[in-house]
């Protein structure tokens, strides 16, 4: 979504202090403040990317009267806990790619097995199906932006951060196909070989 549209979404205004003032006002209406803070547990897998993101999230939540407690779990414990919906805040890394179509229904579709928080909105399901069938790129982009807007308004699995990845290799590694839109596309290592 272009920045001029993104800034209109709840929580995406680039004026961070303005966002914090609004969040503190919401918390105060709910009975919280500097003296009475809301305790929450932030459950994560014991891996550096989600752990780092959770530490940043907890730091930001402190600004709006929410005290986060980090709950670091082994992967074999984390996913069953999430599937049982036995969490307050569950932070997890989610992959995607250059085209959002494969992940939209998977993560946000009603009844999807990876829609862990149970988000369900018939209008979003209709838009997901519509964008998947749309052949005109400009029209599809408009539908995708409408989905993004609705997910933000519904606070459906808010995105906390975006990681950037890169692929590095030695000159003697031959055969990799580097993609310009994702490091995960065409990562077919069975085609690689060493010239050494």
Image (cartoon, rainbow, N blue to C red):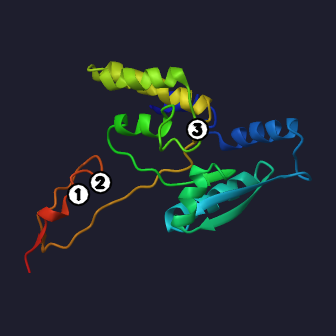
| Residue 33: x %, y % from top left | 88, 47
Compared to residue 140, the image places residue 23 above or below, namely below
Compared to residue 36, the image places residue 15 above or below, namely above
Q: Residue at horizontal 15%, vertical 72%?
A: 171
Q: Residue at horizontal 57%, vertical 50%?
A: 83
Is residue 52 among what the camera can see?
A: no
| Residue 28: x %, y % from top left | 86, 40
Q: Which residue is mark 2?
A: 184
Left or right of 195 in this view: 150: right
Q: Residue furthest right?
A: 35
Q: Which residue is mark 3?
A: 118
| Residue 147: x %, y % from top left | 48, 27
Q: Residue at horizontal 45%, vertical 55%?
A: 163
Badge 1 crowding class, 10 Å Cα cut-off, few under 14, some 14 to 19, many 20 or more, is some
Left or right of 31 in this view: 79: left
Q: Which residue is mark 1?
A: 187
Q: Residue furthest bottom?
A: 196
Of 69 and 14, nearer the camera is: 69
């Amino acid at each position: 979504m272009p920045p001029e549209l993104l800034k209109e979404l709840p929580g995406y205004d680039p004026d961070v202090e303005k966002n914090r003032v609004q969040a503190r006002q919401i918390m105060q209406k709910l009975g919280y403040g500097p003296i009475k803070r809301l305790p929450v547990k932030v459950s994560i897998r014991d891996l550096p990317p989600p752990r780092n993101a959770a530490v940043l999230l907890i730091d930001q939540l402190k600004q709006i009267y929410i005290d986060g407690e980090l709950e670091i779990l082994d992967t074999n414990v984390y996913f069953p806990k999430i599937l049982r919906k036995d969490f307050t805040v569950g932070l997890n890394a989610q992959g995607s790619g250059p085209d959002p179509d494969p992940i939209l229904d998977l993560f946000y579709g009603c009844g999807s097995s990876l829609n862990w928080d149970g988000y369900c909105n018939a209008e979003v399901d209709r838009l997901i199906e519509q964008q998947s069938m749309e052949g005109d790129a400009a029209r599809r982009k408009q539908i995708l932006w409408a989905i993004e807007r609705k997910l933000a308004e519904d606070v459906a699995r808010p995105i906390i951060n975006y990681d950037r990845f890169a692929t590095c290799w030695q000159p003697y590694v031959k055969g990799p196909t580097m993609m310009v839109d994702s490091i995960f596309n065409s990562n077919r290592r069975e085609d690689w070989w060493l010239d050494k």
